[in-house]
């Protein structure tokens, strides 16, 4: 019989072909899912490392404008407001090591500046920005010469 039962079966897919196609589709979908997760993590990290330096510079500007720097001497910390909720900052300062050679000392003496005043007023400021949702940390280290009072 031509066009009977054998030709009807020839028009569809076998069970084996369907299972193989589903296995290939599953492998592709799992790979895409993993790649999407990695892309989201990379985007989150890129956002943090774009925003954190800006926030650290904002804290450093506050430090530079602060009249009473004694509060920064032993460290201070806080949190940012909207739209940077979830970001914390901390500031600490310490006297920095200042190595002067003979030519530098001569310039300072001509300007009437004592070396001890420089050592006392030259500080290293460390600012740390942390995002609490994933614990990423950005550190900024800056050196400042504080004017003698």
Image: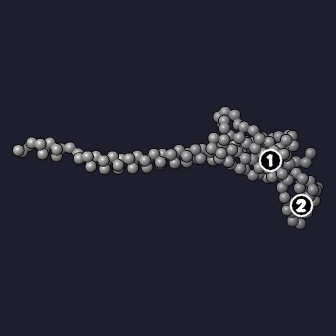
Is residue 147 visible in the rendered structure shown here? yes
Give the residue number, with chain letter if any, for mark 1.
Answer: 92
Left or right: residue 23 versus residue 35 is left
Left or right: residue 110 versus residue 40 is right
In this view of the protein, which residue sits in the foreground, 59 or 5? 5
Q: Earlier in the sequence, mark 1 or mark 2?
A: 1
Whole-percent x, y for residue 24 in the image: 35, 50
- What is the quadrant of residue 91 in the picture? top right
Number of marks in the rendered image: 2
Give the residue number, with chain letter if any, for mark 2.
Answer: 107
The residue that appears at 68% across and 48% down in the rendered structure is 138
Query: Quadrant location of the C terminus?
Result: top right
In this view of the protein, which residue sits in the foreground, 95 or 57? 95
Label 1: state its secondary structure.
strand
Badge 2, how many Cα within 10 Å: few under 14, some, many 20+?
few
Is residue 144 visible in the rendered structure shown here? no
Left or right: residue 42 versus residue 60 is left
The residue that appears at 8% across and 43% down in the rendered structure is 3
The residue that appears at 63% across and 44% down in the rendered structure is 134
């Amino acid at each position: 019989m031509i066009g009977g039962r054998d030709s009807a079966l020839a028009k569809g897919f076998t069970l084996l072909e369907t299972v193989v196609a589903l296995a290939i589709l599953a492998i592709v979908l799992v790979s895409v899912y993993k790649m999407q997760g990695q892309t989201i993590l990379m985007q989150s990290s890129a956002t943090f490392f774009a925003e954190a330096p800006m926030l650290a510079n904002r804290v450093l500007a506050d430090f530079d404008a602060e009249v009473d720097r004694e509060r920064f001497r032993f460290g201070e910390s806080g949190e940012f407001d909207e739209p940077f909720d979830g970001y914390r900052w901390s500031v600490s300062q310490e006297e920095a090591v200042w190595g002067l050679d003979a030519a530098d000392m001569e310039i300072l003496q001509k300007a009437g500046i004592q070396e001890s005043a420089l050592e006392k007023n030259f500080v290293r400021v460390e600012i740390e920005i942390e995002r609490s949702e994933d614990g990423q940390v950005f550190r900024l280290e800056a050196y400042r010469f504080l004017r003698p009072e």
